[in-house]
Image: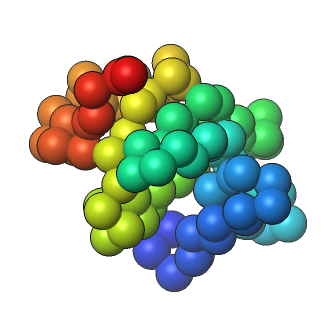
Amino acid sequence: MKYPNIPLINNETAHHFELSIDDMLAFIDYKLKGDKIYLIHTEVPEAMEGMGVAAALVEKTFNYIEEHQLKIIPLCTYIVAFLKRHPEWTRLMAIHE
C-alpha cells in the first residue's frame, strides 16, 4: 500500500474518510446507517491524480471498515471499479436494503 505512514482520518462531522498529503486533502464521502456504510463519492485533488492516492485511501478506508465490523454499500463508481480489481474486499459488501 502506498502512503503507509499517512493516517486515515474519520472526519465524522463532515462524513468523510480523509488522507492529507502535502497539504492537499483526498476524501471519501460516506453515510453511516446502523452497521452499513454507504460510500458515496471519492475525490482526489487533480494535482494528486495518478499517484495511487485514491487506491490508498480506499484500502485504508476498507481496513477501517473491517476493523469496526461494518459492511459497505458502494455507490461511488471509483469504489465499484476498485472492488472489481480487488475482489478480496467483496467480503465487506452488504446487501442493499
Q: Is residue 25 visible?
A: yes
Name the residue rendered at 62%, 41% in the picture: 31
Q: Is residue 55 visible?
A: no
x and y, in percent, of residue 1 in the image: 36, 62
Seen from the viewer's position, the closer of residues 88 and 10 is 10
Lateral position of residue 79 relative to residue 30, left or right: left
Name the residue rendered at 36%, 22% in the picture: 96
x and y, in percent, of residue 48 in the image: 70, 45
Seen from the viewer's position, the closer of residues 82 and 17 is 17
x and y, in percent, of residue 16 in the image: 69, 52
x and y, in percent, of residue 97 in the image: 38, 22
- What is the quadrant of residue 80 in the picture? top left
Name the residue rendered at 46%, 56% in the picture: 61
- What is the quadrant of residue 65 in the picture? bottom left
Please, which residue is most extreme toward the right here? 23
Please, which residue is most extreme toward the bottom here? 5
Q: Is residue 59 above or below residue 37?
A: below
Q: How is the image coloured?
A: rainbow
Q: Is residue 83 above or below residue 18?
A: above
Name the residue rendered at 40%, 51% in the picture: 35
Seen from the viewer's position, the closer of residues 1 and 60 is 60
